[in-house]
Image (spheres, rainbow, N blue to C red):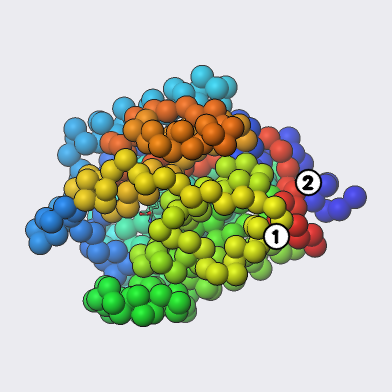
Amino acid sequence: MTLLDSMPTDCVVSAWNEWDRLREMVVGTAVGANYEPTEPGSRPQRRGGREGNPFPTGPKPQHVIDQANEELQGLVQLLQDWDVVVRRPSPVDFSTQLVSPDFSVENQYCAVCPRDVLITVGSEIIEAPMSRRARFFEYLPYRDIVRGYWKQDQNVRWTAAPKPSMHDRMYRQEFWEWPLVERHKRMHDFEFCVTQEEVLFDAADASRFGNDIIIQESMTTNRAGIEWLRRHLQDRGIRVHAVHFPLDLFPSHIDCTFVPLRPGLILTNPERPILEGEDKLFLDSGWKLVDAPQPSLTNDQMPEFCQSSKWLSMNVLSLSPDVVICEENEHELHELLSREGLEVLTIPFRGVYEFGGSLHCATWDVRREGKGEDLLGISS
Ligand code: ARG
């Protein structure tokens, strides 16, 4: 019997991949959401030719919050209809200023995207260090929930990765000034707005494939962050692989770029192919990479204050290896996924877009059936 076989699979916290039958999940809330502030790790911009005007600050308008909450509630209802236990974050006032010994920021952000903050790896919950000042305390709305699981089941492990200083020195501010040609020239350097000094990652840069986890280098995850996760998980036979998508010049969070749907099938972004050679990890073990169709909106048609790209279209949420939830307008994607043999459920979700994500981002899976397996043809 290996160490992995001896790990409990009936633990209240247990999730090994992105697709096994979902049993329990946290869905974000737009209550208290603020506009993301301008800070060294983020330069929010309006879309559609209105880039010149200043980006708003402070709380988001109530009707925008209400719209997002209605759609989030629709997701909660759908999940409950499928017998998934759903929990919601505690309300937090995101309009407060933060002052630490090393930085200050005028307001915080929101609790719409738990995916960015937390990741379940087997029976362990890991709180990411995060990479932006406004998101430093974003674990707080989830702490009641996490503490609850930890108390309920002694097999639950709970880890907070080291918090970074978020000092000016942690960032590479020139990044924001580089013209596109310059970024293109440097696309194989994988250097973005954060330096390599401190341990940084957002949970949403990682994607779980049983005993293998892939994680992209990005504006929100650096090499030290990947190394921290690798060392943290290696004793349990979980392997961490860095992956890269050179054509994404502003990468953050892997779930609009490379989305596994079931063993053997990954939805890929045709504008952001994986670095040459890194595809071997999947192809050699028989996985199929299928490009997503063009999204229903262009980048310019995305909501004015949305900082994500049109590829939120492929930010789908798996209920099981056979059933996937998609945004209702993405008809071409629905057809593609149906052709691949998946049952496609659809709900409206565009009102959530300007809060940083779609269906996968706005959720954090706590329990899925199944256990850790070697799915990429590697075994320790
Ligand atoms: N940077 C991604 C894109 O624009 C958006 C990722 C959103 N994902 C998330 N977990 N918040 O394509």
Q: Name the residue under label 2.
A: 7
Work out whether residue 302 or residue 158 is closer to the camera in this orientation and state it.
302
Work out whether residue 234 or residue 320 is closer to the camera in this orientation and state it.
320
Toward the right, the furthest residue is 1
The amino acid on which the numbered mark 2 sits, given as a three-letter code, is Met
Query: What residue sits 41% from the left and 75% below the top?
Result: 187
Instruction: Answer left or right for 333 relative to 110.
Output: right
- Of labels 2 and 1, earlier in sequence is 2
Q: Which structural element holds mark 1?
A: loop
Query: Does the rendering let one see residue 269?
Result: yes
In the picture, which quadrant includes the C terminus?
A: bottom right
The amino acid on which the numbered mark 1 sits, given as a three-letter code, is Asp
In the depicted structure, whether residue 21 falls above or below residue 115: above
Q: Mark 1 points at which residue?
A: 284
Where residue 116 sits in the image (x, y, percent)? 45, 52
Where residue 345 sits in the image (x, y, percent)? 47, 27
Query: Few, some or many C-alpha atoms within 10 Å of disc 2 (few <14, some 14-19, many ≥20)?
Result: some
Q: Which structural element holds mark 2?
A: loop
Toward the top, the furthest residue is 81
Query: What residue sits 32% from the left and 49% below the top?
Result: 310
Query: Does the rendering let one see residue 94?
Result: no
Where residue 119 sits in the image (x, y, percent)? 55, 50
Camera-nearest label, 2 or 1: 1
